[in-house]
Amino acid sequence: MPEGHTIHRLAADHRERFGGRSVRVTSPQGRFTGSAALLDGAVLETAEAHGKHLFLGFPGTGWIHIHLGLFGKVAFGDAPAPPPTDTVRLRLANAGGYVDLRGPTTCALVTDAEKAAIHDRLGPDPLRDGDDPDRAWRRISRSRSTVAALLMDQKVIAGVGNVYRAEVLFRHGIDPYRAGKDLTAREWDAIWTDLAALMREGVRLNRIDTVRPEHTPEAMGRPPRVDDHGGEVYVYRRARQPCLLCGTPVRTADLAARNLFWCPDCQRA
């Protein structure tokens, strides 16, 4: 599932390509046909993201709410747009290009009130200006759940996925099984600040890189990471490989139906 930086990048791409201009809106697959007819020819005023949720705003009509889930894909292209396949749930197009959406968990036209309700049930997002990390801290500091589980709970903090969760805990030497109530306020402030910086870089580069400059392949004289997900990381998907800092084999375990990765030496209980 895409992490929050990807959705913020998609919002920026929609604004750049279609913002302030009228768009053709169609649903070749047919599952969004009624809403597409209401929006066809309207101006896409803005696009915004909150965690893993994307909102495309059409003044006076509503918002297209998109959640990609595990299988959703977005593909941009230049004009002229080729004929869409019948798997395309939503196509936006104008004279400059097009974007196709396939396989999302959610693609629905919502009202302002419905959009506000979605925001209300999400935690603060490190990439949203003005979001308050203290909202998350109030829940974390009272919780007996593991900090690893809390970071993945979108009601606590929005946009963090499995990669950022594993990497930020490693970067701060925190045992993923530590209870949220045992985290200090200083540690939480550092985690939030680090997540915001890492995720902003993720938006800029369109990939996740979490290693510090002194731990890059060039600095350490090691081969670069080879992985479909790209980016240089400390522990994510490096199970049984030596930790880049101490050489201890990276461990993995199942936590809340997701794979957890950590170094038992660098992240001691």
Image (tube, rainbow, N blue to C red):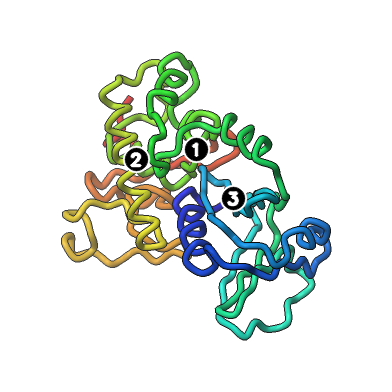
Q: Left of 194 or right of it: where is 16? A: right
Q: Nearer the viewer, residue 142 or 107?
A: 107
Residue 168 versus residue 182 in the image, above or below: below
* Amino acid residing under circle 2: Val
Query: Do we see residue 69 in this rendering?
Result: no
At 59% across and 30% down in the image, what residue appears?
121
CA separation, marks 1 and 2?
Answer: 15 Å
Q: Nearer the viewer, mark 1 or mark 3?
A: 3
Q: Nearer the viewer, residue 223 or 82?
A: 82
Percent position (x, y) of residue 234? 32, 49
Where is residue 97, by image quadrant?
bottom right
In space, the residues marked 1 and 3 are separated at their CA atoms by 15 Å
What residue is shown with label 1? 158
Tag shown at residue 252? none
Label whose residue precedes the other's in the sequence (1 or 3): 3
Spatial CA distance of label 2 from label 3 is 27 Å
